[in-house]
Amino acid sequence: MTRTWEISTVTDAARARIATARVAAAHGVPPLERARLAAALSARLHRCLAKGGAWRLALTHADGTLLIELTSSPADGERPWLINAPCPEPAAGPVGDCVADDAPVLAEALLGADEDTAVVLDRLAEQEELVAFHREELHQTNQGVLALHAELDAAGRAQREAFAAERAARREAEAARRRLTFLADASAALTASLNHEEIVRRLPELLVPEYARSLDVWLLDAEEDHGPSVPRPAAAVLAARTGRPQYAAAEPGRLPGVDDQPPSALLPGRPLLCVPLPARGAPLGVLTLTPPGERWDPDDAVMLLELTRRAGGALENARRFEHNRDIAETLQRALLTDLPALPGLRLTARYLPATYGLNIGGDWYDAFRQPDGSLITVIGDVTGHGLHAAVMMSQLRTALRAYAVDGGTPGELLTRLHTFLHHLQPDLYATAVIARFRPGEPELTWAAAGHPPPVLRGPDGRVRTLDAKPGAMLGIPLHQEIADHTVPLEPGSTLALYTDGLVERRAQGIDPGIERLSAALGSFRTDELDADLDGSAERILEPMLSDSERDDDVCLLLCHLDGSPGGGLGGPFTGGLEGLPGARDGRLGGSRLDGHLPTGS
């Protein structure tokens, strides 16, 4: 269905507008859409009338849509104006599209348009209220978002601060761990040595340049021993007098446990940290340090104070050890005997103290004559180490010489020593081997008490172990009669007496060591032993002791019969018990018992 209107005047336009509104209302166009349609059509008609001319308005209803088309009449090539509106329901009856010119009809049409406008205004008011509500809701939402952003920003700042604090704590923990590790390693390095000069030398190596630019160690007793003293900073002198650490600088250091002092006159441009080296009595000296940078970190200063305290303890321990070692060395030198020089019989001995600890122990050797002209050679080992073992060894040595004056065979002498030791020191034990060389007898008499067996090399180079049944250890709580044993002795023969430190190894036992000693002794020619018994002893020890560190004393006594024609023990020894000459001075190769003792020959 299509309706048309010709429009050339305002009245024509009003009638067409009223008719369009009626048709739209009849076809169920909603008031809002009718108002929109009417307003748009009125505005377009107003423009068309302003242009002038004739216009044609066509209104078509088809497929639930109301289509309005406004074109010029006749058509002048201008594009038509189109607008449409949905018609949700068909017209209930015929729709009048003619509008009379009477006033009631126009008034009714005007009121109908106002009703649509009122509906639009009501809808608009609702929308404005809705918009206001949503605007307020949006404002509240924005306020919440802003508050949330503020909270997130505050949380972010707090998180960043927490991360920064965590990083700082980690750096602090790492620095503390580094200091503790350094303190432990440095303490181990200082206490590993029992030489005070080595400890003093290690201090600058440990602290410079990480914890100090320079370091000076002032040992008080060393300065007294080496002549006039050199100038010292006043803070160092004060630290030595008071025993308290001192810090000398232009500005106070405020270091924990340290007293602040004015800058040093000797080094006015450098801060000085003067820390006493503590001991049980007065301080041993003072450690004077300059900082690696402008000043020390307080935690580094605390670590330096602790390290200095430990260094003082290490120095004091080293001094005590050196003092005890000197006493032990003097005692050991006094106890080691000079071997007698006899025609046809060469003697040489080697004593090597244990690698660790005090250089004194219970190993001993001796050689002396009996009234009948026999030569007694003995080697023994008192259990334990230290001064107690050395004193007991000295008593056994003296007792043996006293018993030997009355004569007696090696077995009888060992039996008497056993009784003596058991009654003198019930909780102390010893082992020993005694060998007797008698002039005019081509045989060797020997006896052993719990000791490694002697080794005898014949003139032909063959070596045998004298392992006939020995007695038990000296001093054990049982009665025993230690037996004598004899073996033929030819010129050129060599007897080796030794202690277990030479042949025994923890991982292998003693038998492999005795085999190595036998092989080493059998590798010599008789003329080599005749010419240089001392050198032969050295060449025996070298392979025997090259396999490991020694943890026990080593003692070796070689007795060699001259292998030259006419040599041996065919006649009596010359000389008596008095004034036995020593072939060599019992020197220890330096001020410590860390070498060997050559004697005899």
Image (cartoon, rainbow, N blue to C red):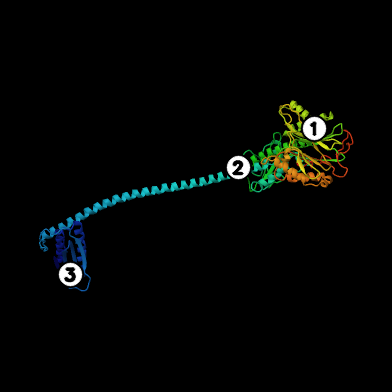
In this rendering, is residue 489 above or below 294? above
For label 2, count other residues whose C-alpha is less than 10 Å away and answer few (under 14), some (14-19) or many (20+): few
Query: Residue 415: x percent and y percent?
Result: 77, 29
Label 3 with label 2: CB-CB less than 8 Å: no
Among the 4 quarters of the image, the one containing residue 266: top right
1 or 2: tag closer to the N-terminus: 2
Among the 4 quarters of the image, the one containing residue 568: top right
In this rendering, is residue 333 above or below 271? above
The numbered mark at residue 55 is: 3
Label 1 with label 2: CB-CB less than 8 Å: no
Q: CA–CA distance between discs 1 and 2? A: 62 Å
Q: Which residue is mark 2?
A: 180
Q: CA–CA distance between discs 3 and 2? A: 104 Å
Quick one: 370 or 212, which is closer to the camera? Answer: 370
* Observer able to see residue 576: yes
3 or 1: tag closer to the N-terminus: 3
